[in-house]
Amino acid sequence: MTTNDLRIVFMGTPDFAVPTLDTLIKRKEHIVGVVTQPDRPKGRGRKLTAPPVKILAENNDIPVMQPTKIRGDEFLVKMKKLSPDLIIVVAYGRILPGHIINLPSQGTINVHASLLPKYRGAAPIQWAIINGETETGVTIMQMDEGLDTGDILLVEKIDVERQDTSATMAVKISELGASTMAKALDLMKGNKLFPTPQDDSHATLAPPLTKELGLVDWSKSASEISCLIRGLDPWPCTYTLLNDKRLRIFNPTVVDNPDLGMQTSAQAVAGSLEPGTVHSANANGLLVTTGEGYLRVREIQPENSRRMTVDAYLRGHQLERGTKLG
């Protein structure tokens, strides 16, 4: 059986899933249906908005299902009518029951955005950045009923650059996921796709993000804080307090080697500035002391305001050296 003979059901919802579905369409795979989340209210007007995967599927005349429940008999009956040989899952957004996972003859495979068994769970991209990983990637996995515990089918790695955020990495990994899925299908066609059990002793978790994670602890190192800022951008975002109001912070740089003037000044006050103290605020950004080193922040978002450069903020506000954040 070639992959073009396989009756495929694709399950996915957000932008992250679009490149894989698009690749399947361009490969002329036999996609008999797409399952995605229901339309949701979005934006200030709370207008009902279709998921990106639904839009792509409908534009290519692929039948779409948007079940509110996937554990009952109703959805199972509809899936059985599609007679899938293979289900491909990319960021669908719900945990699949065993009777759906095991329905196709070729099983259900998933694009997971980490190098399994590391970062099992809902937020693998974010936690990889938060934890300072310099490398992450994509795992094509044979799904089972555990939390990302299925056998590994194919892995591709990618570097995490110093300025990458979870948003930029999501784009890179979604594209890598699409190309890796294409490779997996080609290997499946040649009966060369072999499952490898995960080593559970090396497993780590990537739990859902919470807003509470975003509060900056300035006693940590500049490198740790930078990773947190980048990992939580664009959601839920990191923040500190300025005059008892939340100040979101973005676009960080660890300052290991400041310019000569800054270095001289920094060294002169290194013992007197507590972590979280503004060392300088100018067009180059906000330079803040940390528990180890200095952190330059180039973008901020004051409470009840928009995201802006520090330079733009300083045109209407004063931020003196010695101001304490947090």
Image: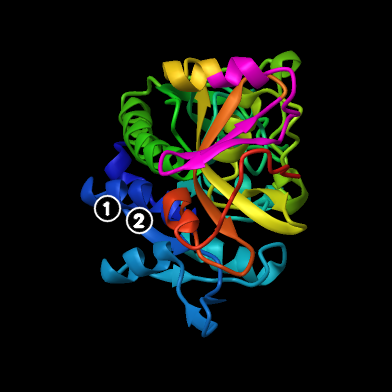
The percent position of residue 242, horizontal first and vertical second, equals 70, 53
Count the labels in the image. Answer: 2
Q: Quadrant of the C terminus?
A: top right
- Residue at 45% from the left image edge and 20% from the top image edge: 261
Q: Is residue 208 above or below residue 202?
A: below
**In this rendering, position of residue 312 left or right of residue 74:** left
What's the amino acid at mark 2? Ile
Q: Quadrant of the N terminus?
A: top left
Determine which of the numbered discs, if any, sits on residue 25 in the image.
1
Q: Coloured how?
A: rainbow
Q: Is residue 208 visible?
A: no
The percent position of residue 263, horizontal first and vertical second, equals 51, 17
| Residue 270 highlighted magenta (yes or no) | yes
- Residue at 57% from the left image edge and 30% from the top image edge: 295
**In this rendering, position of residue 281 left or right of residue 31:** right
The percent position of residue 147, horizontal first and vertical second, equals 71, 37
Q: Which residue is mark 2?
A: 31
Determine which of the numbered discs, if any, sits on residue 228 in the image.
none
Q: Which of 59 and 64 lies nearest the eye of the viewer? A: 59
What's the amino acid at mark 1? Ile
- Residue at 36% from the left image edge and 34% from the top image edge: 176
Q: Is residue 257 visible?
A: yes
Q: Nearer the viewer, mark 2 or mark 1?
A: 1
Q: Which of 281 and 88 lies nearest the eye of the viewer? A: 281
- Residue at 53% from the left image edge and 80% from the top image edge: 44
Q: CA distance from mark 2 to mark 1?
A: 8 Å
Task: Tell me if mark 2 has few (under 14), some (14-19) or many (20+) residues whose alpha carbon lies within 10 angstroms of its own.
Answer: many
Q: Which secondary structure lies at badge 1?
A: helix
Looking at marks 2 and 1 on the same chain, the residue that comes earlier in the sequence is marked by: 1
Q: Which residues are magenta?
A: 265-290
CB within 8 Å, label 2 to label 1: yes
